[in-house]
Image (cartoon, grey):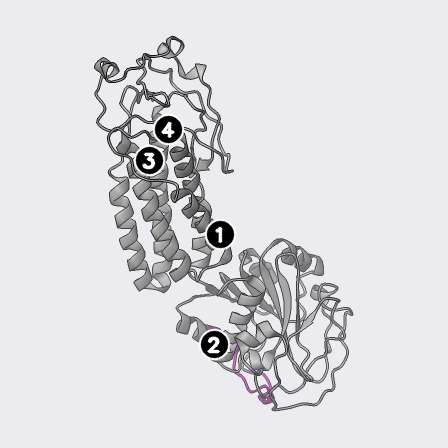
């Protein structure tokens, strides 16, 4: 920096001041190494500092310039580049200032999550606000520097204290708010791994390149954790008009569950195939359990069904419970599927790889794809009660999305209050609203 550059061991403060840095490359988002050296806190200032060291300055570095020791761009953190330098490079003001500004941007991102969380759960939002205040007090203590300033150990220590507080916040968000989704847990473990290699420095200690490497690589995980926390923090139920895929598809994100009819005119099988291959999204086919299927299902052929018109299923079973044979679904649904399901479907018209998850005559199934899945559920039991609706959501989330709860539920209205009495259920829109209220989720009604 002159925010003055120093050498490795022993540390020698250079008299030379570097030229202003050239424009760094922008937009690089991969994790890379970062090497920076810092002088001890409370080092003597000015030219007299040289007398504190027994080793003289190497002549070739006495007039070193930044351009003599080129640096590469490091990871982009909220638009700020963490400069990648090598051992012995001159420290520039941006090596401190860009990280300080990145911390300030991180506070803004956490505040956005707090605002979103406050809509559904004010108590959790209050806790996050308190955490943000604690982190802000550390960040507010971080100085911005200019060319010619000295490097002190507190420049490093404050970043480390902020990182430790950030880990505390991210761990709380991951476990208490987002219910420990696997992708967040993995990123949090990476951040903790880097932080475990660090300790604060005192007067006379050397801040080595490995310290800066670990600190800034840990920080590089923060933006992705922001995105995932925002996604997982508050599940949202979106209600659409029946078959309104044109509107609904704009809301499909990773960790979404789409509840829909067997037939959606504007949804093609190729689009279903693309979504379940590229996104963590599950299509839930809500099946009418009447004795036969009069409809075609072009949206789910050949992704789930082997024929355009599934055959009639005259099983003739009513008002019974059925053992769940798939261990995963049994874990979430219990020992039985809902009663009062009139007629069951068979798996013999499903594509290869479909797994049956209800025993006996009950043939509902699911199939996994690269990232998503297609699953079939009976309309009767689906919204027989808030309890059963919740069990289906939990089962589909845990088994097919790999999270405790989905980020979004998209429900394309199917049945209304005019449904036949024998279905023994009530409009699912009302059931979704009741479930959301019980669990502190948001509901967005987008009926046209």
Q: Residues within 10 Å of mark 3 (few under 14, many from 20)?
A: many
Circle 1 Cα neighbour tier, 10 Å, few/some/many (<14 / 14–19 / ≥20) = few
Q: Nearer the viewer, residue 5 or 207?
A: 207
Nearest the camera: 239 or 213? 213
Classify 332 as above or below 373. Answer: below
- The residue wearing badge 2 is 430
Examine the rendered structure and indicate whether residue 161 appears above or below residue 407.
Answer: above
Determine which of the numbered discs, if any, sits on residue 110 in the image. none
Spatial separation of the CA atoms under disc 1 and disc 3: 26 Å
Coordinates of residue 131 in the picture (x, y in percent): 29, 52
Which residue is situated farthest in the front direction here?
54
How packed mark 2 is, by other alpha carbons closer than 10 Å (few <14, some 14-19, many 20 or more), is few
Tell me how far mark 4 sits from mark 3, CA to CA: 9 Å
Residue tagged 1: 186
Horizontal relation, residue 161 to residue 397: left or right: left
Query: In the rendered structure, which disc, 4 or 3, sits on the residue that comes first in sequence?
Result: 4
Q: Tell me the distance, in whole angstroms, between the alpha carbons under discs 2 and 4.
A: 55 Å
Q: Which of marks 2 and 1 precedes in the sequence?
A: 1
Label 3–label 2 contact, CB within 8 A: no
Q: Position of residue 184 (x, y in %)?
A: 47, 53
Q: Secondary structure at mark 3?
A: helix
Dot label at residue 100: 3
Q: Is residue 431 magenta?
A: yes
Q: Is residue 341 left or right of residue 255?
A: right
Residue 94, given in percent of the width and then of the height, sits at: 36, 27
Q: CA distance from mark 4 to mark 1?
A: 28 Å
Which is nearer the eye, 189 or 172?
189
| Residue corresponding to mark 4 | 95
Q: Secondary structure at mark 1?
A: helix
Residue under the image location 38 percent in, 18 percent down? 20
Which residue corresponds to the image point at 68% horizontal and 65% vertical from the top-left?
Answer: 265
Q: Is residue 14 left or right of residue 360?
A: left
């Amino acid at each position: 920096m002159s925010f003055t550059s120093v050498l490795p061991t022993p540390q020698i403060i250079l008299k030379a001041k570097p030229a202003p840095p050239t424009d760094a490359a922008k937009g690089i988002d991969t994790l890379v190494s970062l090497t920076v050296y810092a002088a001890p806190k409370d080092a003597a200032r000015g030219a007299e500092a040289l007398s504190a060291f027994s080793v003289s300055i190497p002549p070739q570095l006495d007039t070193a310039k930044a351009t003599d020791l080129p640096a590469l761009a490091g990871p982009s953190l909220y638009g700020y580049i963490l400069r990648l330098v090598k051992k012995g490079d001159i420290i520039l003001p941006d090596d401190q200032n860009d990280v300080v500004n990145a911390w300030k941007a991180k506070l803004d991102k956490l505040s956005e999550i707090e605002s979103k969380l406050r809509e559904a759960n004010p108590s959790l939002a209050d806790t996050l606000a308190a955490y943000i205040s604690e982190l802000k007090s550390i960040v507010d203590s971080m100085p911005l520097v200019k060319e010619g300033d000295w490097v002190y150990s507190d420049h490093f220590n404050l970043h480390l204290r902020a990182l430790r507080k950030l880990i505390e916040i991210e761990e709380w968000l991951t476990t208490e708010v987002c219910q420990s989704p696997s992708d967040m847990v993995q990123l949090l473990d990476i951040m903790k791994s880097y932080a475990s290699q660090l300790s604060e420095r005192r007067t006379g200690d050397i801040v080595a390149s490995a310290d800066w490497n670990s600190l800034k690589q840990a920080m590089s995980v923060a933006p992705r954790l922001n995105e995932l926390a925002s996604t997982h923090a508050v599940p949202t139920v979106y209600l659409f008009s029946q078959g309104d895929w044109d509107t609904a598809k704009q809301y499909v994100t990773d960790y979404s569950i789409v509840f829909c009819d067997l037939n959606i005119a504007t949804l093609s099988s190729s689009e279903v195939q693309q979504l379940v291959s590229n996104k963590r999204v599950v299509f839930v086919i809500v099946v009418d359990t009447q004795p036969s299927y009069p409809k075609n299902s072009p949206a789910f052929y050949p992704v789930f069904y082997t024929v355009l018109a599934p055959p009639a299923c005259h099983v003739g079973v009513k008002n019974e419970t059925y053992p769940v044979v798939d261990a995963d679904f049994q874990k979430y649904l219990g020992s039985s599927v809902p009663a009062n399901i009139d007629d069951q479907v068979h798996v013999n018209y499903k594509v290869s790889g479909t797994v049956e998850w209800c025993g006996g005559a009950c043939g509902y199934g699911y199939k996994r794809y690269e990232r998503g899945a297609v699953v079939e559920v009976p309309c009767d039991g689906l919204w027989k009660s808030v309890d059963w609706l919740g069990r289906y959501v939990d089962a589909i989330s845990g088994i097919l999305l790999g999270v405790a709860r989905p980020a979004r539920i998209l429900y394309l209205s199917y049945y209304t209050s005019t449904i036949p009495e024998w279905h023994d259920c009530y409009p699912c829109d009302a059931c979704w609203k009741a479930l959301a209220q019980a669990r502190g989720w948001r509901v967005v009604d987008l009926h046209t």
